Image: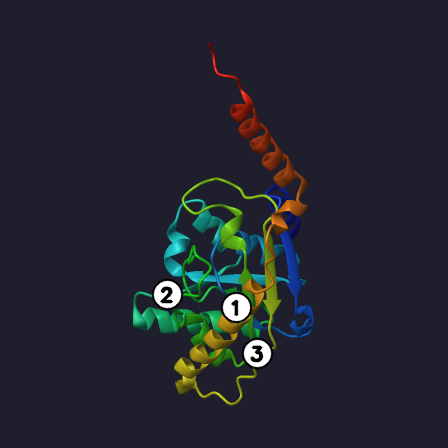
Amino acid sequence: MRRWSKDNIWLSRARVEIEGLENIDLSKPQIFVANHSGLHDILSLSAYLPIQFRWIAKKSLFNVPFMGWHMRRSGYIAIDRENPRDAAKSIIEAAGVIHNGINAIAFPEGTRSRTGDLGNFHSGAFSLALRTAVPLVPISLDGSYRVIAPKTLQVNPGTVIRIKIDLPIDLFPYSKGDKRRLMDDVFQIMNRNLAELRGRRQSGEERQDAVFRWIHGVTQRKSESRIQKPEAK
């Protein structure tokens, strides 16, 4: 998975800058929560996190042909959002997986924002974290939504994906009734980090990529040729 993800990032000509790897504990499980704005969030985390982990996903996705079968075979962790009783049962089952030493990653927004802005959180990953009491690690990603333009297959070569892994949150001060407070605290951390990552963007940073320069050069030459072409007499 790591090799396949890196190959796909390379094919799309994206560059990944990641910081905070020292906040990943290699000796015990953690639950990671990350914002989600594009396919390259999944590819980037799969490629550059130095741990084995399982994705947390809504249970309905496991019923999708082919994709759902792969998710089940790969050991993805299902969380039921529709039925409160089944949701509680799925969180208990997921907690058992975490207690067996498995790291897990969730996108608490539940779907891609497509704009890079942080959306509202669903509570499943936070309920799971409070039940397991393992450290919760916020991850912020900026740039993924710009790699492939929304609703198109147009790839923007040279896009920089910036990732910041924040300090693990010790859940000892939180009770099981503090789920909303935990969600709000994590939202504030991730929103602040996203603003910081966006502030690092540089004008024209995509020009460092050779493919971007080639495309830009071709476009420029075609434009110039149209301007210089003499009118027919």
Disc 1: which residue: 195
Q: Amino acid at mark 3?
A: Pro
Q: Residues within 10 Å of mark 3 (few under 14, many from 20)?
A: many
Label pair 2/3, CB-CB below 8 angstroms: no
- In the shown orientation, is residue 55 left or right of residue 109? right
SS at circle 1: helix
Q: Is residue 215 above or below residue 25?
A: above
Q: Amino acid at mark 1?
A: Ala
Label pair 1/2, CB-CB below 8 angstroms: no
Query: Toward the viewer: 186 or 117?
Result: 117
SS at circle 3: loop
Q: Amino acid at mark 2?
A: Asp
- The residue that appears at 61% across and 47% down in the rendered structure is 158
**Location of residue 127 by image quarter:** bottom left
- The residue that appears at 38% across and 72% down in the rendered structure is 89
Q: Position of residue 200 (x, y in %)?
A: 60, 63
The label shown at residue 135 is 3
Front disc: 3 or 1: 1
Disc 2: which residue: 80
- The residue that appears at 41% across and 71% down in the rendered structure is 124
Q: Is residue 221 above or below residue 208?
A: above
Q: Position of residue 118 (x, y in %)?
A: 44, 66
Res 128 seen here: no
